[in-house]
Amino acid sequence: MFANYAPLIVDGLADAALIFFVAVGLTLVFSVLHILNVAHGSFYSLGAYLSVVIGTFVAGRGWPALSFLALLISPIIVTLALGPLIERTLLRWTYGRSEALQILVTFGLFLILEDAQKLIFGVQSYSQDAPMTLLGTTQIAGIVYLNYQLLLIALAVLVAIGLRLLLKHTGVGKLIIAVVADQEIARAVGIDASRVFMLAFSLGVFLAALGGALASPTVGVSPGLGAETIVLAFAVAAIGGLGQIEGAALAAILVGLTRSAAIYFFPEFQPVVPYIVMLAVLLVRPYGLFGSIGLRRI
Amino acid sequence: MIHLKTFAAAAVALLVLAMPATAQSDKPSEVGFGVFTFTSGPAAAYGMPGRNAAELVIEQINAAGGIGGVKIKPTYVDEGQGTEGVVAEFRRLAADQNNQVMVAALSSGNCLALAPVAEQLKMPTFMWNCDTHQLFLKDKYKYVFRTNSSTVPEFVASALYLLSVKPDVKRIAIINPDYAFGRDAAAIFTAAMKALKPDVEVVAELFPKLGSPSYNTEISRLVTAQPDVIFSNLWGADLENFVRQAAPRELFTRSKVILALGESILQRVGTLLPDGVIVGVIGDGWWLSPDSQKNPQTKEFVETYRKRFNEYPVFPAFKMANTINAVKVVYGKALADTKGKWPTRDDLVAAAKNLKTETLTGTIELRDDNDGLVDQVIGMTTKDSGHPFPIMGDMVRYQASLVTPPVGVDPLAWIAKLNPSVLATLPKPGSYK
């Protein structure tokens, strides 16, 4: 029985892992800044591009193992270069303004970043395979899987646990929770909410770029990757409940598994499955699986 | 009176003398060509070789004096902007009378959208890469020509070759892009296989969307279906991504795989593909084919292309080069028909009718319905000590007439009538050498 469904589950979880990195960043930013960041997908693609460029550079010079380092360095570079800059120069002017304006600003940012990527990286497709080649393969239920795919699942679990630990057991996390719960009271007790906003946004950028970097060895990187990713991330965040880390994790698993099942049983429906799931969930729970109308928490 | 007669005679004489000069001055200083291909996005991996070839061939033609002394001025249009934008660009270019020819397009979807527009605007359009057989299936066009083969001969050739090298095939799986080209190919390949070997069974049929970055779940699904043969007409970066993701997962060693457009990525994936994968060029544009090797013009094109673009020209480059060279032939014919007067768009259309011309890799023949007849070259990957990537071995060159339904015959009905006995009469793998 397990042998029949094992491939479906493994594929679904590997898919879910990649979706989770982006969706959790999106949901974190929404939770703290109250902004639905349309440009979030661009950070994903920037992480992917940078990782491939650095990874292929080091692999081409005889150090393929260093391409693993590129997977970590790339999101850090993207975060340091763009996170604080965008939050301090662009987003801060939108706080407290209408949601329509916020969406328009982040959509404008998305368009700028997409064109900037074309200018910097060109329009060709990029790929790197050193990380997945180096890690080898494993057979599960008669099917060869890349160990890299299994590593992605493990990393997603670690990131989910790490985020929860960060929020619950560190000073920074507690500051974020305080700002999410009530910004005015947080400011009244001396918390620098602006700094928390910048940190939370940069963390969101890092998670998106990390998702892109980790995805880069298993996907082709080309213009349009960011747009495709953000649409899916929105669906996952909506299913889980905007602002909910556990919700994002559960929604990513749900979407990953249903997408995988669709490819196995109803391949025609695969592209629309995430949105069918989203519709079904929102019809029953309009605020998502973990969302609620009154309580603000993360 | 005498003076008047003398004056009239002189005027007539001057007019007659001036006529050749007037005809000469009809010629524009340059003629515009719209060249449509993908230069962005995942499809650019396939489209850029076409763009590069156009640049090279047009430069060569211009360096040799142009067409009848007129230089070609190309305007390149990126099909990556989507069909709506492509149609708008086509209309914009067609509105300029200096643009006389459109070399469009790469995508079957764009071709189907552009053909009626070309007809409406009376714009001579040479479809350099359109493969869908639907192009001339129902509609008759005067201004649209396909200097290329269609999905029917291309994927009937895949089925014929497969049954030549693996006659015992029972279970087939298909993974094609989710649009006209992929859907048509699946229907044609399946119909051909069922006609030629009625006991075959389709055990999986997947249509991932065009531009999909990941195929990992599809790869698992294909493996679990345990097919004898996997057929795919993925192309561009999609095909490259698929190969990069499938090769380490042993897909190519577990089943016989047909990559109908596989030659286009051989140089990019290097040694990832094992020997024995069936690869095609959907046409005859293989730079190492015997016909290419014995043609000095082709060898020069290959060498110039390699030096400039740092890779060998893959088959989309030949489709484009052959089309532009065919358009040059059309101009030559039109100039002869108009006795040196610069041809109008309608003159070009008249000259293109039933064109038959040599190309860098074989021949193009335009039928009564303006569809192209091009031979099909297909083979299998094999290692080659001269290159860091596999090349095509065990090649066959199927004559266009063998794999193309006659004019006016429904292609799927023609395929359904294919008789298994035809297999015994086919040229054998390795016969094209």
Image (cartoon, helix red, strand yellow):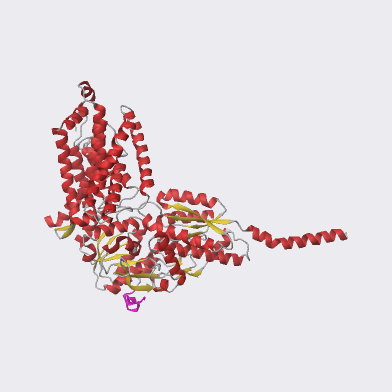
Q: Is residue B370 left or right of residue B421?
A: right
In the rendered image, which quarter contains the C terminus of chain A?
top left
Q: Residue at x 46, y 63 (%)?
A: B321
Q: Is residue A212 left or right of residue B299?
A: left
The image shows residue A110 at horizontal and vertical percentages of: 35, 40
Provide the residue span drawn in magenta: B419-433
The image shows residue A126 at horizontal and vertical percentages of: 32, 53
Q: Residue at x 21, y 22 (%)?
A: A190
Q: Residue furthest top?
A: A188
Q: Quadrant of residue B110?
A: bottom left
Q: Is residue B423 magenta?
A: yes
Q: Is residue A6 left or right of residue B193?
A: left
Q: Is residue A96 above or below residue A282?
A: above
Q: Main secondary structure of the magenta part?
A: loop
Closer to the camera, A230 or B387? B387
The image shows residue A127 at horizontal and vertical percentages of: 29, 54
Q: Residue furthest bottom?
A: B425
Q: Is residue A31 above or below residue B413?
A: above
Residue A133 seen in the current view: yes
Closer to the camera, B407 or B75? B75
Q: Quadrant of residue A192?
A: top left
Q: Is residue A205 above or below residue B389?
A: above
Q: Is residue B341 magenta?
A: no
In the rendered image, which quarter contains the N terminus of chain A?
bottom left
The image shows residue A106 at horizontal and vertical percentages of: 34, 36
